[in-house]
Every structure is written in C-alpha cells, then in structure tokens.
Amino acid sequence: MKMCDMFQTADWKTEKHVPAIECDDAVAADAFFPVTVSLGKEIAHPNTTEHHIRWIRCYFKPEGDKFSYEVGSFEFTAHGECAKGPNEGPVYTNHTVTFQLKIKTPGVLVASSFCNIHGLWESSKAVALK
C-alpha cells in the first residue's frame, strides 16, 4: 500500500473533513503571503473528546520540482478532556491555522488532516505568481 492510498479527498464545501485552503490565487514572488487552512468551513466538524481533528500538515510542491516541501505541522491537543470526564474540560482548540510563507516559483499547496474517527484527508490549491 502506498501512503497516498490512505488519504481521502472530496470537495470541502460538501465534506466536513476536507481541509479548506484559503489564500490568493496569485502572489508576488519572494514576498510573504497569508494562508489559512481550516476544516468544517461549510459544514461544521465536531470538536469533542470523542470526535475531533488532531492535526493539519501543509506542504508546497513547486511547479516542475521533483520534491515537495513541508511548510508546517499544526497539532490540536485540547478537546475537552478532563478528569471529570469527556467534554468536561475547560479547554478546546479549534482546527484552523493561519501562517505565512513566500515562494519563488508557482506551485501547489497541499493540506492534510487527521480526524480521530474518519482518518486522513487532503486537499490542494494551485498558487501562481503575479
């Protein structure tokens, strides 16, 4: 089995597990730009002790390059866990992250996520240069 066979994908507008990547379609070369990745943008994903998103990872694959580059790895570790019981805790993290990066060539941003019940999901977005 290949790693790519483990990931599911769909349209983030109709599937709550798919990472939604938000950034400009075209950016200036070698200038930082913001990227936001979230889950449940159109359909809310649960955020409970029993059902939650554990992490989001982001990569950039430059056009014409053989390799992809990891941009960031973001963990969400508080989901209402507590000694009192599930969903009784005082802290919850939300499965949304915003970061900045700069690129020298056009390429594709890829985001992956992990739901503790429904497994691995991914999406991608092309980014051009102005």
Image (cartoon, rainbow, N blue to C red):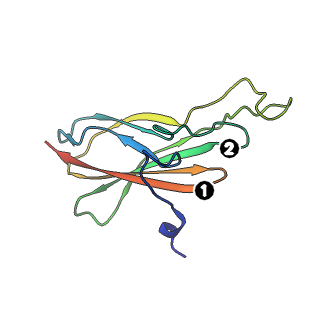
The residue sitting at the left extreme is: 130
Based on the displayed image, in which of its 4 quarters is residue 65 positioned? bottom left
Q: Residue at x 49, y 35 (%)?
A: 96
The residue sitting at the front extreme is: 14
Judged left or right of residue 71, residue 114 is right
Work out whether mark 2 precedes mark 1 in sequence or the reverse, and give the earlier one. 2
Q: Nearer the viewer, residue 13 or 95?
A: 13
Q: Check disc 2 and give the amino acid type.
A: His
Q: Nearer the viewer, residue 28 or 42?
A: 42
Q: Check disc 1 and give the amino acid type.
A: Gly
- Badge 1 crowding class, 10 Å Cα cut-off, few under 14, some 14 to 19, many 20 or more, is some
Mark 2–mark 1 Cα distance, whole angstroms, equals: 11 Å
Q: Considering the numbered disc 2 on the image, is that residue within a helix, a strand or a loop? A: loop
Q: Considering the numbered disc 1 on the image, is that residue within a helix, a strand or a loop? A: strand
Q: What residue is shown with label 2?
A: 51
Q: Residue at x 62, y 38 (%)?
A: 46
Residue 63 location (% of width, % of height): 23, 59
